[in-house]
Amino acid sequence: MLERIRRRRYRNYSDLYFIEETVRKGILAIMPAFNEENNISSVLADIHTIAPDIDVLVVDDGSKDKTRIVARENGAYVLRLSINMGYGAALQAGYKYALKNKYNAIVQLDADGQHDPADIPTMLEKLNNDHVDVVIGSRFMEKKTYKGPLGRRLVIGMFRLIAKIITGKTITDPTSGYQVLNSRAVNFLKDSMPTDFPDTDTIILLLLSGFTIGEIPAHMRPRSSGTPMVTGFRSIYYLYKISLSILVTLLRRNKKQ
Amino acid sequence: MSWQSKLFVLFAGIFLILLVLELVRRRKIREEYSVLWILTAITMFALAWWEGLLLFFTHLIGAVMNSSTIFFFGITFLGAICLHFSIKISQLTNQVKELAQEVAILRAEIEESGGKPPIAGEQK
């Protein structure tokens, strides 16, 4: 009986036992995606045209549509989370994947196409030349590039001020999800990442822990379809959550890197 | 405290203890989750049984009615139970997240190495 089970398992999992440790290195673009089958192919095509030598990983956060199939057809690696766990958890899964495959740096961007992949080469250049650990694609470095709702701009302004007061450094767009991180920063964030979404709190944590952050002006494109992440009631929760998260980040003892 | 309310609280305490014990026996509650419930029941029972203790606590918290003391302790313990649950739920959420991520990475590795991921429960 035991022998039979063992043999069956061996047959079913045989591929698992012979996985070769592939060392990929290079750059990995991570895109958490939730029900983005309509947007994802054009974003993947754009990344491939602009930066053909970087790998792309789509983290399908429990989508109910064909996100993962479309992504795979367009040449991306796919991580499929069985349950919808939120943006932060999806991103964290991507971090773990990147570390496991020994990538040198990661680019994180939204799958809805709002983050223009045209900025990726500039960000990677900044990471290399300025020897920083993180590069943020900022919506506010060039005037008039971003015309979001007034409320949102006010909130971002407030968080910018809070980050400035706490860390003494000016980060023009601490809420931007468009970032490039080297493996050191990824390894650090892998364990201390908020599940719902990383934001100003993560930036403050990185700065307090001794990481260096640079910024480049990024260009936002209007989203083609789908719904934005933070709207209505959730924006109040967003405000509360990030403020609380910043507070407890300060109350925790942060290890210097 | 009137003998009716005393009797009522005593019976409520006994009922709660028996209920929790039965649930543990049927493995509907794990032992670790029964602790706070049993403590709640014992406290209610002790306060109703031992008049002196009840009077002492009533005086201590400045309550007018003896029954308020019993309710106060009941609510305090229920609050503790809720907090305990919040902690446990957060832990469970984290564990589920870790598992989902690990499964996703394993599945990706199998797919990338050319094999087909085994479907759970599939008999061959």
Image: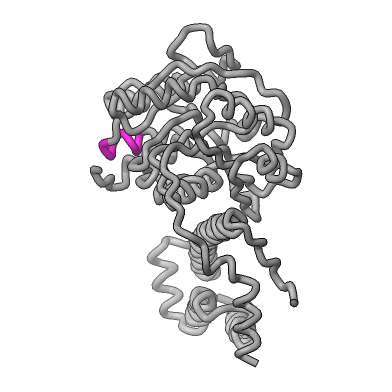
Q: Main secondary structure of the magenta part?
A: helix
x, y percentage for residue A242? 47, 36
Query: Which quarter of the rendered picture does the C terminus of chain A lie within?
Result: top left
Residue at horizontal 50%, vertical 84%?
A: B49
Q: Position of residue B79 (x, y in %)?
A: 52, 62
Please, is residue A129 above or below residue B106 in the view?
Answer: above
A145 is higher (above) or lower (below) than B12: above
Instruction: Left or right? Give the position of A190 relative to A6.
Output: left
- Verify whether residue A36 appears in magenta: no
For residue A199, above or below residue B79:
above
* Occupied quadrant, residue A3: bottom right
Looking at the image, the residue that sits furthest to the top is A144
Residue depicted at x 63% and y 45%: A60
Q: How is the image coloured?
A: one colour
Can the viewer see residue B64? no
Between A24 and A58, the one lying in front of the other is: A24
Q: Is residue A37 visible from the viewing direction of this image?
A: yes
x 74%, y 77%: residue: B124
In magenta segment, residue A209:
yes
Q: Residue at x 59, y 31 (%)?
A: A235
The answer to whether residue A92 is left or right of residue A148 is left
In the rendered structure, which segment of residues is drawn in magenta? A204-210
